[in-house]
Image: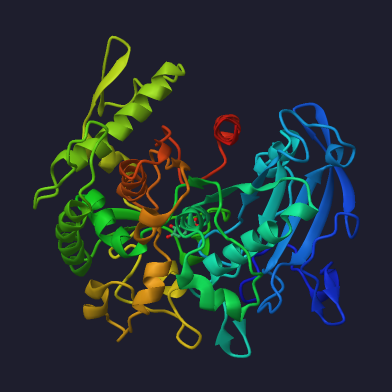
Amino acid sequence: QMGAPMNKKVITEDMITNKTENGYNLNFDVNKSYTTKTATVNGKTVTYRAYENIVYVAKPVDIAYQTINIYIPEEYFKNKSVGKYNAKTAPIFFPNTIGGYMPGAAGVPGNGRDGNPDASLVALSNGYVVASPGARGRTLEKDGKYTGKAPAVIVDLKAAVRYLRYNDGKMPGRADRIISNGTSAGGGVSALLGATGNNRDYEPYLKEIGALNARDDIYAVSAYCPITNLENANTAYEWMFNDVKTYKKIDITMLDYNVERKYTEGTLTDDEISRSNDLKKMFPDYVNSLKLKDKNGKLLTLDKDGNGSFKNQIKQYYIDSANVALKKGIDLSEFDFLTIKNGKVVDLDYDKYIAYMGRQKTPGAFDNVDLSTGENNEFGDKTTNNKHFTEYMLEHSTVNGTMADKKIIKMMNPMDYIGSSKVKYWRIRHGAIDKDTSLAIPAILAIKLENLGKKVDFASPWATPHSGDYDLDELFKWMDKIVA
Ligand code: DHB
């Protein structure tokens, strides 16, 4: 039961395609172990080779997750091109399947839940090589030890990147044009992968699993609703939702955005309200410490009540979002929190908008007093299933919880590494009605990246809940542009 998401095929030893008498063959061979597949994308037939269930490290801990699937347009074996690309120029689309910080098996292109071709199929039809890595997650166990706690997920993704870098000359596609994609926890680790390329902090962990000796930096990051900056996500959440005393919450088993959600309604207890007030008060100090600047170079700050230019910026993202919707012809007249003049959204009543969106999580939303969150579970270790990762919750723990290793908390947060990342291109989306984390969290990441001189495409699409891959036309336009 542990960790195997329902209705997904579990990979077993007999399915592994690169197993030899003495371990796993980490040299890719285009002429071996593939099947040829076809699919229809926008009325066009796409033919590609599928190299699946390749273990990407010499000493895997869990072969159900430490594998990669690689898909290559058949044309590239006939010296032909697909769209703008050929075997020499094709970028590599690198989508992870992580949700809820659960284990995620290597992805298989196909039709999504909506029946339309998913991002990987569209990528193949546009001439991309697709390399979908699996990675361990928080619920895995082996011989009575937890095997997928932080930082396993990022270590595995790095090992998969190393496999592609190491084998660059042996397959079509450019390993110096790897574009990572992910949603939610998967968006968080997509950003983390971009932030931490070649960083030495991860080296001991990579060695331990027998990762190849190669670079692990990538070219660009796409992240949908990244659940990230976890140790500041509690305070960001209460800064945004403090006024909302009722909630519609989900069970930890439905955290993963891939799982259908059922909501339970409730009202915050006095203890929770008191915690919310404490956490809200802590957020301004964090924001102010970052010295973020807007596009005009003006400091984005908060006063002790949580008001100020940073809050205005967050409000502006929602206004911009509504304007994009309005331009597309969407009727916004039902929303009395909007002021629309001459065909333009000129104002949004922030408090009303937050109330309309509603609260989904109870305080602390990410690190809780009773160690009940998915993130508490992610920060466990080999022998302890759940741990705290903020001082406040450690002090207020109702279950005598212990603190995760400071270094591991750091290794899970892209904010601590983007200053030394060479990745120039970042595309970040967070739906305007996504309340899995505060919009402040992806916004802080995007603004910090912009302040560092990166090319950042950040937006909060209107009426969009916690989800990803919903704007593939725009995503591929962006990817085609940045690799050119
Ligand atoms: C995901 C959602 C969450 O609300 C969370 O805290 C962690 C992960 C997810 O959908 O992946």
Q: Nearer the viewer, residue 223 or 85?
A: 85
* Picture layout, residue 479 above or below residue 334: below
Please report the residue visible at 28 percent of the width from the left and 9 percent of the height from the top.
342
Could you say where residue 63 lies in the image, as x and y percent from the top left? 72, 73
**Residue 412 percent coordinates (x, y):** 43, 66
Q: Is residue 429 visible?
A: yes
Q: Position of residue 164 (x, y in %)?
A: 69, 57
Residue 293, quarter of picture: top left
Whether residue 172 sits left or right of residue 215 in the image: it is: right
Q: Is residue 464 left or right of residue 83?
A: left
The image's colour scheme reads rainbow
User: Is 30 drawn above or below residue 25 in the view shown?
Assistant: above
Q: Residue 441 versus residue 159: which sits nearer the camera?
A: 159
Image quadrant assignment for residue 231: bottom left
* Residue 115 visible somewhere in the drawing: no
Counting the numbered discs, the total is: 0
On the image, the x and y values in percent for residue 435 come to 37, 49
Measured along the vertical axis of the image, is residue 434 above or below residue 395? above
Extreme residue in the left direction:
304
Quarter containing the N terminus: bottom right
**Residue at figure coordinates x 45%, y 74% from the top left:** 377
Quadrant into which the C terminus falls? top right
